[in-house]
Image (cartoon, rainbow, N blue to C red):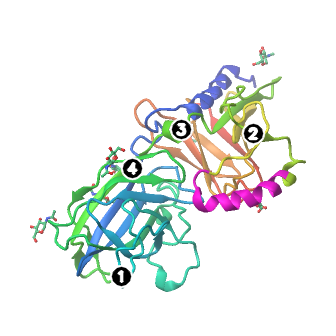
Amino acid sequence: MEPRRSVLLLALAVAAALSVAVAYDPLDPNGNITIKWDIMSWTPDGYVAVVTINNFQTYRQITAPGWTVGWTWAKREVIWSMVGAQATEQGDCSRFKANIPHCCKRTPAVVDLLPGVPYNQQIANCCRGGVVSAYGQDPATAVAAFQVSVGQAGTTNRTVKVPKNFTLLGPGPGYTCGPGKVVPSTVFLTPDRRRKTQALMTWNVTCTYSQHLASKYPSCCVSFSSFYNDTIVPCAKCACGCEHKTCVQGDSKRLAVTGKHAHTAAAVRGQHRDKEAPLLQCTTHMCPVRVHWHVKLNYKEYWRAKIAITNFNYHMNYTQWTLVAQHPNLDNITEVFSFGYKPVVSYGSISNSLSLSLLSLRDRSYHATLQRDHA
Ligand SMILES: *[C@@H]1O[C@H](CO)[C@@H](O)[C@H](O)[C@H]1NC(C)=O
Ligand SMILES: *[C@@H]1O[C@H](CO)[C@@H](O)[C@H](O)[C@H]1NC(C)=O
Ligand SMILES: *[C@@H]1O[C@H](CO)[C@@H](O)[C@H](O)[C@H]1NC(C)=O
Ligand SMILES: *[C@@H]1O[C@H](CO)[C@@H](O)[C@H](O)[C@H]1NC(C)=O
Ligand SMILES: *[C@@H]1O[C@H](CO)[C@@H](O)[C@H](O)[C@H]1NC(C)=O
Ligand SMILES: *[C@@H]1O[C@H](CO)[C@@H](O)[C@H](O)[C@H]1NC(C)=O
Ligand SMILES: *[C@@H]1O[C@H](CO)[C@@H](O)[C@H](O)[C@H]1NC(C)=O
Protein backbone atom coordinates (compact mmCIF):
# COMPACT_ATOMS: atom_id res chain seq x y z
CA MET A 1 0.00 0.00 0.00
CA GLU A 2 1.42 3.32 -1.08
CA PRO A 3 1.12 6.23 1.26
CA ARG A 4 -0.79 9.08 -0.29
CA ARG A 5 1.07 12.11 0.84
CA SER A 6 -0.93 14.69 -1.02
CA VAL A 7 -3.84 14.28 1.33
CA LEU A 8 -1.72 14.91 4.35
CA LEU A 9 -0.87 18.47 3.51
CA LEU A 10 -4.51 19.28 3.91
CA ALA A 11 -4.10 18.70 7.59
CA LEU A 12 -2.46 22.07 7.86
CA ALA A 13 -5.80 23.68 7.18
CA VAL A 14 -6.54 23.01 10.82
CA ALA A 15 -4.04 25.66 11.74
CA ALA A 16 -5.83 28.23 9.68
CA ALA A 17 -9.21 27.33 11.10
CA LEU A 18 -8.05 27.64 14.66
CA SER A 19 -6.50 31.03 14.29
CA VAL A 20 -9.21 32.93 12.47
CA ALA A 21 -10.22 36.12 14.19
CA VAL A 22 -13.39 37.54 12.78
CA ALA A 23 -16.45 39.33 14.08
CA TYR A 24 -18.36 36.14 14.60
CA ASP A 25 -17.53 32.50 14.93
CA PRO A 26 -17.38 30.90 11.48
CA LEU A 27 -17.61 27.41 12.93
CA ASP A 28 -20.76 28.29 14.84
CA PRO A 29 -22.34 31.22 13.00
CA ASN A 30 -25.78 30.81 14.61
CA GLY A 31 -24.43 30.29 18.10
CA ASN A 32 -25.52 32.74 20.75
CA ILE A 33 -26.33 33.09 24.40
CA THR A 34 -29.77 34.41 25.26
CA ILE A 35 -30.66 36.08 28.52
CA LYS A 36 -34.40 35.93 29.12
CA TRP A 37 -36.26 37.82 31.85
CA ASP A 38 -39.68 36.48 32.81
CA ILE A 39 -41.67 38.61 35.23
CA MET A 40 -43.40 36.05 37.42
CA SER A 41 -45.23 38.35 39.86
CA TRP A 42 -45.69 41.98 40.80
CA THR A 43 -44.65 43.31 44.21
CA PRO A 44 -45.80 46.55 45.90
CA ASP A 45 -43.01 48.52 44.19
CA GLY A 46 -41.80 46.30 41.36
CA TYR A 47 -41.60 42.74 40.26
CA VAL A 48 -39.99 39.34 40.73
CA ALA A 49 -38.32 38.01 37.61
CA VAL A 50 -36.64 34.74 36.76
CA VAL A 51 -33.64 35.37 34.55
CA THR A 52 -32.60 32.43 32.37
CA ILE A 53 -29.30 32.25 30.52
CA ASN A 54 -29.29 29.75 27.66
CA ASN A 55 -26.04 28.87 25.96
CA PHE A 56 -27.12 28.02 22.41
CA GLN A 57 -23.56 27.73 21.17
CA THR A 58 -22.44 24.46 19.67
CA TYR A 59 -19.19 24.06 21.53
CA ARG A 60 -18.17 27.16 23.50
CA GLN A 61 -18.93 26.60 27.15
CA ILE A 62 -18.64 29.11 29.98
CA THR A 63 -15.84 27.83 32.16
CA ALA A 64 -14.72 28.69 35.68
CA PRO A 65 -14.72 31.29 37.20
CA GLY A 66 -18.04 31.58 35.39
CA TRP A 67 -20.34 34.18 33.91
CA THR A 68 -20.96 37.73 35.01
CA VAL A 69 -24.12 39.39 33.70
CA GLY A 70 -24.46 43.15 33.93
CA TRP A 71 -26.92 45.82 32.81
CA THR A 72 -27.85 49.46 33.37
CA TRP A 73 -31.21 50.14 34.99
CA ALA A 74 -33.49 52.33 32.90
CA LYS A 75 -34.87 54.16 35.98
CA ARG A 76 -33.82 54.13 39.64
CA GLU A 77 -34.49 50.46 40.23
CA VAL A 78 -32.91 48.57 43.11
CA ILE A 79 -32.53 44.85 43.74
CA TRP A 80 -34.30 43.90 46.97
CA SER A 81 -33.14 40.33 46.92
CA MET A 82 -31.82 37.55 44.73
CA VAL A 83 -32.05 33.77 44.76
CA GLY A 84 -29.49 31.61 42.99
CA ALA A 85 -27.07 34.45 42.25
CA GLN A 86 -25.74 37.62 43.79
CA ALA A 87 -24.69 41.11 42.80
CA THR A 88 -20.95 41.53 43.19
CA GLU A 89 -21.31 44.96 44.82
CA GLN A 90 -24.05 46.40 46.96
CA GLY A 91 -23.37 50.02 46.01
CA ASP A 92 -24.68 53.07 47.84
CA CYS A 93 -27.92 52.21 49.62
CA SER A 94 -27.69 55.13 52.07
CA ARG A 95 -31.04 56.55 50.98
CA PHE A 96 -32.77 53.53 52.50
CA LYS A 97 -33.69 53.59 56.20
CA ALA A 98 -35.39 50.36 57.19
CA ASN A 99 -34.99 47.60 54.65
CA ILE A 100 -31.63 47.71 52.93
CA PRO A 101 -31.66 46.40 49.35
CA HIS A 102 -29.32 43.71 48.10
CA CYS A 103 -27.93 46.10 45.48
CA CYS A 104 -28.45 49.79 44.74
CA LYS A 105 -26.00 50.16 41.89
CA ARG A 106 -27.27 51.60 38.63
CA THR A 107 -25.12 49.05 36.79
CA PRO A 108 -25.28 45.83 38.78
CA ALA A 109 -22.98 42.91 37.97
CA VAL A 110 -24.40 39.52 38.89
CA VAL A 111 -22.56 36.23 39.39
CA ASP A 112 -23.72 32.71 40.07
CA LEU A 113 -23.50 31.15 43.53
CA LEU A 114 -21.17 28.27 44.22
CA PRO A 115 -22.41 24.68 44.42
CA GLY A 116 -23.49 23.66 47.90
CA VAL A 117 -25.19 26.89 49.00
CA PRO A 118 -28.17 26.36 51.35
CA TYR A 119 -31.35 25.18 49.62
CA ASN A 120 -33.22 28.38 50.43
CA GLN A 121 -30.76 30.31 48.26
CA GLN A 122 -31.16 28.01 45.28
CA ILE A 123 -33.49 27.80 42.32
CA ALA A 124 -33.49 25.31 39.45
CA ASN A 125 -30.39 25.57 37.24
CA CYS A 126 -28.52 27.87 39.60
CA CYS A 127 -25.44 27.56 41.70
CA ARG A 128 -22.90 25.91 39.46
CA GLY A 129 -20.25 28.54 40.04
CA GLY A 130 -21.20 30.20 36.76
CA VAL A 131 -20.18 27.22 34.64
CA VAL A 132 -22.51 26.58 31.69
CA SER A 133 -22.06 23.83 29.09
CA ALA A 134 -22.46 24.43 25.40
CA TYR A 135 -25.79 23.31 23.96
CA GLY A 136 -23.99 21.07 21.47
CA GLN A 137 -22.24 19.29 24.33
CA ASP A 138 -24.84 18.90 27.03
CA PRO A 139 -28.20 20.62 26.58
CA ALA A 140 -29.21 19.74 30.15
CA THR A 141 -26.53 21.95 31.72
CA ALA A 142 -26.44 24.59 28.97
CA VAL A 143 -28.74 26.74 31.05
CA ALA A 144 -28.33 28.90 34.15
CA ALA A 145 -30.99 30.78 36.07
CA PHE A 146 -31.53 33.12 38.98
CA GLN A 147 -34.40 35.05 40.52
CA VAL A 148 -34.33 38.76 41.16
CA SER A 149 -36.75 40.92 43.12
CA VAL A 150 -36.67 44.46 41.72
CA GLY A 151 -37.98 47.55 43.50
CA GLN A 152 -38.80 51.10 42.36
CA ALA A 153 -39.55 49.60 39.01
CA GLY A 154 -43.18 50.07 38.02
CA THR A 155 -45.80 47.42 38.49
CA THR A 156 -47.51 47.08 35.12
CA ASN A 157 -46.20 46.00 31.77
CA ARG A 158 -46.39 49.64 30.62
CA THR A 159 -44.44 51.18 33.50
CA VAL A 160 -41.70 48.55 33.74
CA LYS A 161 -38.71 49.57 31.66
CA VAL A 162 -36.37 47.01 30.12
CA PRO A 163 -32.80 47.47 31.45
CA LYS A 164 -30.23 48.74 28.97
CA ASN A 165 -26.67 47.94 27.97
CA PHE A 166 -26.56 44.28 28.88
CA THR A 167 -23.10 42.82 29.26
CA LEU A 168 -21.90 39.25 29.57
CA LEU A 169 -18.46 38.09 30.63
CA GLY A 170 -18.12 34.45 29.89
CA PRO A 171 -15.61 34.72 31.69
CA GLY A 172 -13.58 37.60 30.30
CA PRO A 173 -14.55 39.67 27.29
CA GLY A 174 -15.71 38.31 23.95
CA TYR A 175 -19.50 38.66 24.11
CA THR A 176 -21.53 41.53 22.75
CA CYS A 177 -25.15 41.75 23.83
CA GLY A 178 -27.94 43.32 21.85
CA PRO A 179 -30.76 45.38 23.38
CA GLY A 180 -33.43 43.76 25.53
CA LYS A 181 -36.53 43.17 23.41
CA VAL A 182 -40.00 42.60 24.78
CA VAL A 183 -41.17 39.28 23.32
CA PRO A 184 -44.37 37.24 23.71
CA SER A 185 -44.62 36.06 27.31
CA THR A 186 -43.07 32.69 28.02
CA VAL A 187 -45.63 29.95 28.57
CA PHE A 188 -44.85 27.43 31.31
CA LEU A 189 -46.33 23.98 31.61
CA THR A 190 -47.14 22.79 35.12
CA PRO A 191 -45.25 19.65 36.21
CA ASP A 192 -48.27 17.42 35.56
CA ARG A 193 -48.47 18.99 32.08
CA ARG A 194 -52.19 19.65 32.49
CA ARG A 195 -52.11 23.42 32.87
CA LYS A 196 -50.25 26.30 31.26
CA THR A 197 -49.25 29.48 33.02
CA GLN A 198 -47.47 32.41 31.54
CA ALA A 199 -45.03 35.12 32.53
CA LEU A 200 -46.54 38.56 33.11
CA MET A 201 -43.97 40.08 30.78
CA THR A 202 -40.87 38.71 29.03
CA TRP A 203 -37.85 40.25 27.39
CA ASN A 204 -34.95 38.62 25.60
CA VAL A 205 -31.36 39.68 25.11
CA THR A 206 -29.07 37.93 22.61
CA CYS A 207 -25.30 37.90 23.09
CA THR A 208 -22.84 36.70 20.48
CA TYR A 209 -19.19 35.79 20.77
CA SER A 210 -16.28 37.18 18.83
CA GLN A 211 -12.78 35.80 19.19
CA HIS A 212 -11.52 39.18 18.03
CA LEU A 213 -13.10 40.93 21.02
CA ALA A 214 -11.96 38.23 23.42
CA SER A 215 -8.33 38.62 22.54
CA LYS A 216 -6.15 40.10 19.86
CA TYR A 217 -4.36 36.77 19.52
CA PRO A 218 -5.51 33.21 19.06
CA SER A 219 -5.53 31.04 22.14
CA CYS A 220 -3.91 28.01 20.54
CA CYS A 221 -1.63 27.05 17.71
CA VAL A 222 -1.09 23.95 15.64
CA SER A 223 2.11 22.06 14.95
CA PHE A 224 2.49 19.22 12.50
CA SER A 225 4.55 16.11 11.97
CA SER A 226 4.25 12.86 10.05
CA PHE A 227 5.70 9.38 10.07
CA TYR A 228 7.49 9.84 6.76
CA ASN A 229 9.44 12.98 7.66
CA ASP A 230 11.69 13.70 10.61
CA THR A 231 10.95 17.41 10.45
CA ILE A 232 8.40 18.76 12.85
CA VAL A 233 6.65 21.87 11.61
CA PRO A 234 6.35 23.83 14.84
CA CYS A 235 3.82 26.45 15.80
CA ALA A 236 4.67 29.81 14.29
CA LYS A 237 6.93 31.96 16.43
CA CYS A 238 4.82 34.24 18.63
CA ALA A 239 1.68 32.62 17.18
CA CYS A 240 -0.24 33.90 20.18
CA GLY A 241 1.63 37.18 20.53
CA CYS A 242 4.82 37.79 22.46
CA GLU A 243 4.34 41.33 23.72
CA HIS A 244 4.06 41.91 27.46
CA LYS A 245 4.01 38.25 28.22
CA THR A 246 5.97 36.88 31.11
CA CYS A 247 6.60 33.19 31.21
CA VAL A 248 8.08 30.45 33.34
CA GLN A 249 10.90 28.16 32.26
CA GLY A 250 9.90 24.53 32.15
CA ASP A 251 8.28 22.36 34.77
CA SER A 252 11.01 22.49 37.39
CA LYS A 253 10.43 26.11 38.35
CA ARG A 254 6.71 25.71 38.15
CA LEU A 255 6.01 24.95 41.77
CA ALA A 256 8.13 27.79 43.07
CA VAL A 257 6.46 30.31 40.81
CA THR A 258 2.91 29.12 41.25
CA GLY A 259 3.46 29.09 44.98
CA LYS A 260 4.62 32.68 44.93
CA HIS A 261 1.78 33.77 42.70
CA ALA A 262 -0.90 31.82 44.51
CA HIS A 263 -1.36 34.43 47.19
CA THR A 264 -1.59 37.37 44.80
CA ALA A 265 -3.81 35.45 42.46
CA ALA A 266 -6.29 34.64 45.19
CA ALA A 267 -6.35 38.23 46.42
CA VAL A 268 -6.87 39.58 42.95
CA ARG A 269 -9.51 37.04 42.04
CA GLY A 270 -12.16 38.68 44.20
CA GLN A 271 -12.05 41.98 42.36
CA HIS A 272 -10.85 41.07 38.91
CA ARG A 273 -11.93 37.50 38.71
CA ASP A 274 -12.19 37.64 34.96
CA LYS A 275 -8.90 39.29 34.27
CA GLU A 276 -6.55 36.77 35.77
CA ALA A 277 -3.56 36.71 33.46
CA PRO A 278 -2.33 33.38 32.21
CA LEU A 279 0.94 32.13 33.62
CA LEU A 280 2.56 30.54 30.61
CA GLN A 281 5.38 28.12 30.30
CA CYS A 282 8.00 29.73 28.04
CA THR A 283 7.66 28.55 24.45
CA THR A 284 8.52 30.14 21.13
CA HIS A 285 4.83 30.37 20.23
CA MET A 286 3.67 31.65 23.63
CA CYS A 287 0.30 29.99 23.24
CA PRO A 288 -1.67 28.73 26.23
CA VAL A 289 -2.59 25.60 24.27
CA ARG A 290 -0.80 23.73 21.51
CA VAL A 291 -2.47 21.21 19.25
CA HIS A 292 -0.04 18.83 17.62
CA TRP A 293 -1.21 16.90 14.59
CA HIS A 294 0.86 13.82 13.80
CA VAL A 295 0.08 11.69 10.79
CA LYS A 296 0.63 8.09 11.79
CA LEU A 297 -0.64 6.23 8.77
CA ASN A 298 -1.63 7.22 5.29
CA TYR A 299 -2.93 4.44 3.10
CA LYS A 300 -5.18 4.47 0.09
CA GLU A 301 -8.02 3.21 2.24
CA TYR A 302 -7.62 5.42 5.22
CA TRP A 303 -5.41 7.74 7.14
CA ARG A 304 -4.86 8.08 10.80
CA ALA A 305 -3.68 11.13 12.68
CA LYS A 306 -2.89 11.58 16.31
CA ILE A 307 -3.76 14.81 18.01
CA ALA A 308 -1.90 15.85 21.12
CA ILE A 309 -3.17 18.80 23.06
CA THR A 310 -0.91 20.46 25.59
CA ASN A 311 -1.83 23.09 28.15
CA PHE A 312 0.95 25.62 28.81
CA ASN A 313 -1.05 27.83 31.16
CA TYR A 314 -0.36 27.07 34.81
CA HIS A 315 -3.37 29.14 35.84
CA MET A 316 -5.85 26.95 34.02
CA ASN A 317 -7.12 23.47 34.61
CA TYR A 318 -9.43 22.74 31.74
CA THR A 319 -11.98 20.42 33.27
CA GLN A 320 -14.27 20.60 30.27
CA TRP A 321 -13.05 21.48 26.86
CA THR A 322 -13.67 21.02 23.19
CA LEU A 323 -11.30 21.12 20.29
CA VAL A 324 -12.91 22.21 17.06
CA ALA A 325 -10.98 21.48 13.92
CA GLN A 326 -11.76 22.12 10.32
CA HIS A 327 -10.25 20.02 7.60
CA PRO A 328 -11.38 19.27 4.05
CA ASN A 329 -11.11 15.58 4.74
CA LEU A 330 -12.85 15.25 8.08
CA ASP A 331 -16.34 14.62 6.80
CA ASN A 332 -16.25 10.92 7.42
CA ILE A 333 -14.22 10.21 10.50
CA THR A 334 -14.71 6.55 11.14
CA GLU A 335 -13.12 6.28 14.48
CA VAL A 336 -11.87 8.54 17.23
CA PHE A 337 -9.90 6.78 19.88
CA SER A 338 -9.82 8.00 23.49
CA PHE A 339 -12.37 10.80 23.15
CA GLY A 340 -15.93 11.66 22.38
CA TYR A 341 -16.41 13.58 19.18
CA LYS A 342 -19.15 14.87 17.02
CA PRO A 343 -19.19 16.38 13.58
CA VAL A 344 -20.03 20.07 13.46
CA VAL A 345 -22.97 20.81 11.21
CA SER A 346 -21.91 22.25 7.88
CA TYR A 347 -22.68 25.85 7.09
CA GLY A 348 -22.30 26.72 3.44
CA SER A 349 -18.65 26.80 2.60
CA ILE A 350 -17.59 25.91 6.10
CA SER A 351 -17.88 22.19 6.39
CA ASN A 352 -15.93 19.17 7.34
CA SER A 353 -15.40 20.27 10.89
CA LEU A 354 -15.27 18.19 13.92
CA SER A 355 -15.22 18.81 17.58
CA LEU A 356 -13.62 16.63 20.17
CA SER A 357 -14.93 16.93 23.68
CA LEU A 358 -13.11 15.63 26.58
CA LEU A 359 -13.38 15.90 30.23
CA SER A 360 -10.20 17.29 31.62
CA LEU A 361 -6.95 18.91 30.69
CA ARG A 362 -5.78 18.88 34.24
CA ASP A 363 -3.01 16.51 33.42
CA ARG A 364 -1.82 19.04 30.90
CA SER A 365 -1.63 16.79 27.93
CA TYR A 366 -4.02 14.76 25.83
CA HIS A 367 -3.87 12.51 22.84
CA ALA A 368 -6.59 11.60 20.45
CA THR A 369 -6.34 9.56 17.31
CA LEU A 370 -8.54 10.14 14.31
CA GLN A 371 -9.03 7.71 11.54
CA ARG A 372 -10.75 8.52 8.34
CA ASP A 373 -11.57 6.41 5.33
CA HIS A 374 -10.57 7.82 2.02
CA ALA A 375 -13.76 8.28 0.05
C1 LIG B 1 -29.74 32.08 18.78
O1 LIG B 1 -29.41 30.71 18.60
C2 LIG B 1 -30.54 29.89 18.37
C3 LIG B 1 -30.04 28.47 18.31
O2 LIG B 1 -28.96 28.34 17.43
C4 LIG B 1 -31.22 30.32 17.06
O3 LIG B 1 -32.37 29.53 16.86
C5 LIG B 1 -31.62 31.78 17.19
O4 LIG B 1 -32.16 32.21 15.96
C6 LIG B 1 -30.43 32.63 17.52
N1 LIG B 1 -30.87 33.98 17.78
C7 LIG B 1 -30.30 35.02 17.17
C8 LIG B 1 -30.88 36.35 17.49
O5 LIG B 1 -29.36 34.89 16.41
C1 LIG C 1 -49.60 44.48 28.63
O1 LIG C 1 -50.81 44.03 29.19
C2 LIG C 1 -51.91 44.21 28.35
C3 LIG C 1 -53.15 43.77 29.10
O2 LIG C 1 -53.05 44.02 30.46
C4 LIG C 1 -51.74 43.42 27.08
O3 LIG C 1 -52.82 43.67 26.20
C5 LIG C 1 -50.45 43.83 26.40
O4 LIG C 1 -50.21 43.01 25.29
C6 LIG C 1 -49.29 43.68 27.37
N1 LIG C 1 -48.09 44.20 26.73
C7 LIG C 1 -46.95 43.57 26.78
C8 LIG C 1 -45.80 44.24 26.14
O5 LIG C 1 -46.83 42.49 27.34
C1 LIG D 1 -24.98 52.33 27.01
O1 LIG D 1 -23.70 52.21 26.43
C2 LIG D 1 -23.45 53.20 25.45
C3 LIG D 1 -22.11 52.90 24.80
O2 LIG D 1 -21.27 52.23 25.67
C4 LIG D 1 -23.45 54.57 26.12
O3 LIG D 1 -23.23 55.58 25.15
C5 LIG D 1 -24.80 54.79 26.77
O4 LIG D 1 -24.81 56.01 27.47
C6 LIG D 1 -25.12 53.68 27.72
N1 LIG D 1 -26.47 53.83 28.20
C7 LIG D 1 -26.76 53.84 29.49
C8 LIG D 1 -28.20 54.00 29.84
O5 LIG D 1 -25.89 53.69 30.34
C1 LIG E 1 -36.33 34.25 23.85
O1 LIG E 1 -35.33 33.37 24.35
C2 LIG E 1 -35.77 32.04 24.54
C3 LIG E 1 -34.62 31.26 25.09
O2 LIG E 1 -34.12 31.83 26.23
C4 LIG E 1 -36.24 31.44 23.24
O3 LIG E 1 -36.73 30.14 23.48
C5 LIG E 1 -37.32 32.31 22.65
O4 LIG E 1 -37.66 31.80 21.40
C6 LIG E 1 -36.84 33.74 22.50
N1 LIG E 1 -37.93 34.54 22.00
C7 LIG E 1 -37.77 35.34 20.97
C8 LIG E 1 -39.00 36.07 20.50
O5 LIG E 1 -36.69 35.50 20.42
C1 LIG F 1 10.13 17.18 5.39
O1 LIG F 1 9.44 18.36 5.86
C2 LIG F 1 10.14 19.57 5.59
C3 LIG F 1 9.36 20.70 6.26
O2 LIG F 1 8.03 20.67 5.88
C4 LIG F 1 10.29 19.78 4.10
O3 LIG F 1 11.00 20.96 3.86
C5 LIG F 1 11.02 18.58 3.51
O4 LIG F 1 11.05 18.71 2.10
C6 LIG F 1 10.33 17.29 3.89
N1 LIG F 1 11.11 16.16 3.44
C7 LIG F 1 10.59 15.14 2.78
C8 LIG F 1 11.52 14.05 2.44
O5 LIG F 1 9.38 15.08 2.48
C1 LIG G 1 -5.02 22.48 38.87
O1 LIG G 1 -5.13 21.17 39.37
C2 LIG G 1 -4.01 20.78 40.19
C3 LIG G 1 -4.19 19.32 40.54
O2 LIG G 1 -5.51 19.01 40.82
C4 LIG G 1 -3.97 21.69 41.42
O3 LIG G 1 -2.87 21.35 42.22
C5 LIG G 1 -3.81 23.13 40.96
O4 LIG G 1 -3.86 24.01 42.05
C6 LIG G 1 -4.94 23.50 40.00
N1 LIG G 1 -4.66 24.82 39.46
C7 LIG G 1 -5.61 25.75 39.27
C8 LIG G 1 -5.17 27.05 38.71
O5 LIG G 1 -6.78 25.55 39.55
C1 LIG H 1 -18.59 7.17 5.57
O1 LIG H 1 -18.01 5.91 5.86
C2 LIG H 1 -18.96 4.88 6.05
C3 LIG H 1 -18.25 3.58 6.46
O2 LIG H 1 -16.90 3.67 6.35
C4 LIG H 1 -19.73 4.68 4.73
O3 LIG H 1 -20.72 3.68 4.91
C5 LIG H 1 -20.40 5.99 4.37
O4 LIG H 1 -21.05 5.86 3.12
C6 LIG H 1 -19.39 7.11 4.28
N1 LIG H 1 -20.09 8.37 4.06
C7 LIG H 1 -19.62 9.33 3.26
C8 LIG H 1 -20.44 10.57 3.17
O5 LIG H 1 -18.58 9.18 2.63
Residue 166 painted magenta:
no
Q: Which mark is residue 246?
A: 2
Residue 267 painted magenta:
yes
Q: The residue under label 2 is which amino acid type? A: Thr
Examine the rendering and report whether any part of residue 112 can be seen: yes
Q: Nearer the viewer, residue 1 or 135?
A: 135
Q: Position of residue 77 (x, y in %)?
A: 30, 67
Instruction: Please tell me whether residue 349 is drawn above or below residue 38 in the rendered image.
Output: above
Q: Residues within 10 Å of mark 3 (few under 14, many from 20)?
A: many
Residue to which mark 3 is pinned? 353
- Number of the front mark, 2 or 4: 2
Please report whichever mark, 2 or 4, sits nearer to the chain's N-terminal start: 4
Q: The residue under label 1 is which amino acid type? A: Lys
Q: Position of residue 18 (x, y in %)?
A: 58, 35
| SS for dot 4 | strand
Instruction: Please tell me whether residue 12 is drawn above or below residue 264 in the rendered image.
Output: above
Q: Dominant secondary structure of the magenta stretch?
A: helix
Give the quadrant of ligand 7: top right
The residue located at (30%, 58%) in the rendering is 204
Q: Position of residue 279 (x, y in %)?
A: 73, 46
Please report whichever mark, 3 or 2, sits nearer to the chain's N-terminal start: 2
Find the distance from the CA under tag 3 to the CA under tag 4: 24 Å
Question: In this rendering, would 105 be left or right of 194?
Answer: right
Q: Which residues are magenta?
A: 257-275
Please report whichever mark, 1 or 4, sits nearer to the chain's N-terminal start: 1
Q: Which mark is residue 207?
A: 4
Q: Which mark is residue 164?
A: none
Instruction: Please tell me whether residue 98 is drawn above or below residue 368 in the rendered image.
Output: below
- Number of the front mark, 3 or 1: 1
- Number of the front mark, 3 or 4: 4
The residue located at (69%, 46%) in the rendering is 278
